[in-house]
Image (cartoon, rainbow, N blue to C red):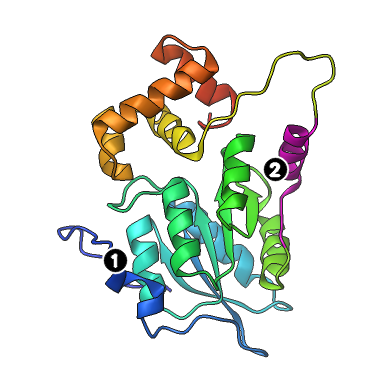
Amino acid sequence: MMLAPIPRSQPFELSRANACDDTPVPHGHQPNKALRIIIADDHPVVLSGIEMVLSSYADTPYSVVATAENADELIHHLQRTPCDLVISDYVMPYGCFPDGLALMSYLKRHFASLPLIVITMLRNPSLLQALLNVGVNSLFDKRSALSELKRAVYSTARGRRYLCPTFAAILDAQALPIAGSNTPSVSLSNREIEVVRLFAQGLSGRQIAAQLNRSEKTISRQKRTAMDKLGLVHDGGLMEFARVSGLRST
């Protein structure tokens, strides 16, 4: 079920009046009713695939009540469409509202009662941990078989955290000391991670500042701080770090 998209000629305005707590739209699963799901991904083929997978299980009734291709449309639907669970891609760069950690933090602040599954191809352990820290309920690797998504939905809808095996292994490895290594691990802040991720996508400092609602000077400082922590001098090194650390899908 596709709701009417937000008109592209009108910029998306984020205000207190747009928050979930100020809208009468009810969220929350009702017993003996189909689980109502909103899916967000900027690739239509992924939306269709997820919808097809979830509708193919007669024993577990799921109802996809809306789909979105960017953050603007996702928030638009959440304000107007009752649902019980959200499945959202992490990287959706084509809306006015930012994607990534900014979007996930916003969803967990203003739609806190809704379980949220984030699907992504990014495998950076600091990023995955940051998502859990802001309250994301479950993480699903887009490289996994879509049939496994049913298990993620089933667990999350029942209040249990689901981590796909790939992400669980990455997070476990992050928590364990590396034998024979004297090199201290480098920890970037959530804001530095987002700046590096967007830089690796090819955005300029001005574009990143506009997307994250920060000054260009702040973005430049956070990028430089990240490079200093990583011991990097050139932008090419930062691009390579983003690639090998899973902040940039290959």
- 164 drawn magenta: yes
Residue 48 at x, y percent in the picture: 50, 60
Q: Residue at x 55, y 58 (%)?
A: 49
Amino acid type, callout 2? Phe
Q: Main secondary structure of the magenta part?
A: helix
Residue 86 at x, y percent in the picture: 53, 66
In which quadrant is the N terminus drawn? bottom left
Task: Note whether 129 is above or below 218 in the view shown.
Answer: below
Packing grade of label 1 (10 A; few <14, some 14-19, many >=20) is some
Q: Which numbered disc covers residue 112? A: none
* Secondary structure of the residue carrying numbered label 2: helix
Task: Note whether 184 is above or below 33 in the view shown.
Answer: above
The front one of 80 and 110 is: 110
Q: Earlier in the sequence, mark 2 or mark 1?
A: 1
Q: In the shown orientation, is residue 235 left or right of residue 141?
A: left
* Residue 60, quarter of picture: bottom right
Q: Residue at x 60, y 36 (%)?
A: 126
- 85 drawn magenta: no
Residue 124 at x, y percent in the picture: 60, 34
The front one of 43 and 31 is: 31
Mark nearer the viewer, 2 or 1: 2
Amino acid type, callout 1? Pro
Residue bearing mark 2: 167
Which residues, given as a range, are shown in magenta?
161-176
Residue bearing mark 1: 5
Task: Note whether 122 is above or below 145 in the view shown.
Answer: above
Q: Residue at x 48, y 55 (%)?
A: 104
